[in-house]
Amino acid sequence: MIRTSAPVDAPAAGAWEELVTTALLGTDRRTPPGGAPGREAPVALLDAAAVQTVRRRAGLRPARAAERPEPAPADPRPPLPAAAARRLALLLAGRPGTAGGGRRGTAPDLMELLPQWLAAANAHGYAAPAQALPALLDAARGRTDLRPAALAFAGPRALWLARLNPDWRFALRAAPGGGAALPGPEDTELIGQLWEEGLFAERVALLAAIRARRPAAARELLSATWPTERAEDRLMFLDSLRTGLGPDDEGFLEQALADRSRNVRATAAELLSALPGSALAARTAARAGTCVAVDHTRGTPAIVVEAPHECDTGMERDGVVPKAPAGRGERSWWLGQLLEAAPLGAWPERLGGRTPQQIVALPVRDGWQGELHAAWCRAAVRQRDAQWARALLGAPAAPGAGGPGAVSLAERAKLLGTLNAGERAEWVAGFIATHGLSEAFQLLGVCAVPWSAPLGRAVVDALNIARDAGSYPWSFSGVMGLAERCLDPAEASRLDALLAVPDEAEDASPGAGGYWAEAFQRLVTTLRLRSAMTDELSSTGVS
């Protein structure tokens, strides 16, 4: 047995050409390299040519036999149904559609359907076919967004392959502890040993696994070695406390406020501000309360703002960064940080018993409204406060749909993330029905897939209106691409009436009618393909 993994020295320059020359001239006139003249010269020439052929093809040098790798681990999950396995092969062999806003034809973009297929296959608990693993790992190597679902589907054999092929080493980095098995919660001795001696990735994975099951045990493990950890490691370990964050973590986080690393202090302050009952939250609420009040002296109540005049050591210890970014005023910078960290539950009492909706509706004097509402938006997202998110979002049909404080599109998308999936879809559907699709792309991206029936209808109706109005069609290609991936496949039958090429108005973009018909045809084809994918994964036949 030989091993073919050792690199070979480059063959002598011109070795192959020398053999070719000898063959053309004949062995009577030229002796083969390394051979002797005579009757055996032709045989020696052929032998040398065979050796060089193998070298040229393999590019590797024979070496001593190495120990064979252990067999790939078994995957106990049920195999894919045969039709689903064939579909996976087609998706992996597919090519992305044309980038940008150009015409893509009517064929579905198979690579864009792969994430959805993987999510469905993982939901069914199927094992990946062994023959599909190389292509699956290659796809995940090229697209980081595929990696979590692809590696979950590929299972333990993906890690086995990754140890043999450097191109797939990303799978080891993505797997907890580099693919190594973590000790069970009852094995305290092994846990302690891995925490003291393990690689950084293994320690992060261990801490995250323990935190998910026993938050207090993870905190105690971290406390034991905290003073000796590197600053960058402390930051990563501290981030793991977001899982299961609770009042019992306050003491440890308060100590971290005095850490020598600014990033560690900032993260500790952020976590404490997410605990409304923490001492930091109370301190921040008191500071923020001195900056915002309701003025009744001019008839109509209005909010007045007095930004801090300095960033003292107490503010800095509690996570306020003293140096403002370029182009930003220091006082507004300090104010925004205080308002973002202050518990939202303190404002109704501070501002006259008003509800969040009433507070947000108050006028704000001296041009502070944008700063104030933007900070409250960040606080609502950080504290996952749906009531304040609704107040800041406002009604979807409001002028500009920016809420009473003209909240930006990016802020609205983040606020929507604090609502449940049904309420999120309902708000976005109302926004589209009133304002169309020109600003809806970012909002649609936070909605659950598949889209609810009201949201799907709102998107299709808005696309139809844009088509009938002769709108420039390529400006809607992003929304159309989202619809291909997110619209409920059951909506396909409603789209049949949109497949014909419409009559183009005089002021319509040239060729717009054909583009719209082509785009709707691709949408219908993709929806029916997604429906077939679902049926294939639900079938009982196996490969």
Image: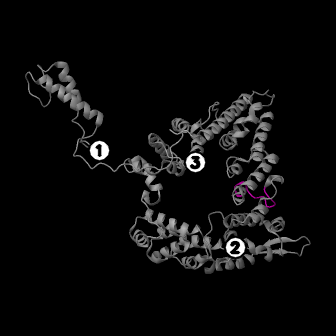
The three-letter amino acid code for the residue at tag 2 is Ala
- Contact between marks 1 and 3 (CB within 8 A): the answer is no
> Local crowd at mark 2 within 10 Å, few (<14), some, or many (≥20)?
many
The three-letter amino acid code for the residue at tag 3 is His
Location of mark 3 (residue): 124
Percent of width and height locating residue 517: 72, 30
Location of mark 1 (residue): 5
> Local crowd at mark 3 within 10 Å, few (<14), some, or many (≥20)?
some
Q: For marks 1 and 3, give the one nearer the viewer.
A: 3
Cα gap from disc 1 to disc 3, whole angstroms: 39 Å
Q: Place residue 96 in its image quadrant.
A: top right
Disc nearer the start of the sequence (1/3): 1
**Residue at screen point 58% across, 71% down:** 266
Percent of width and height locating residue 298: 90, 73
Identify the secondary structure beneath mark 2. loop
Q: For marks 2 and 1, give the one nearer the viewer.
A: 1
Vertical placement of 483 versus 328: above or below? above
Identify the secondary structure beneath mark 1. loop
Question: Is the magenta region chiefly helix, strand or loop?
Answer: loop
Left or right side of 57 for 149? right
Vertical placement of 165 versus 84: above or below? below
> Local crowd at mark 1 within 10 Å, few (<14), some, or many (≥20)?
few
Tell me if I can see residue 252 in this picture.
yes
Left or right side of 297 for 483? left
The three-letter amino acid code for the residue at tag 1 is Ser
Span shown in magenta:
402-411
Cα gap from disc 2 to disc 1, whole angstroms: 60 Å
**Residue at screen point 16% across, 26% down:** 45
Tell me if I can see residue 14 in this picture.
no
Vertical placement of 101 versus 170: above or below? above
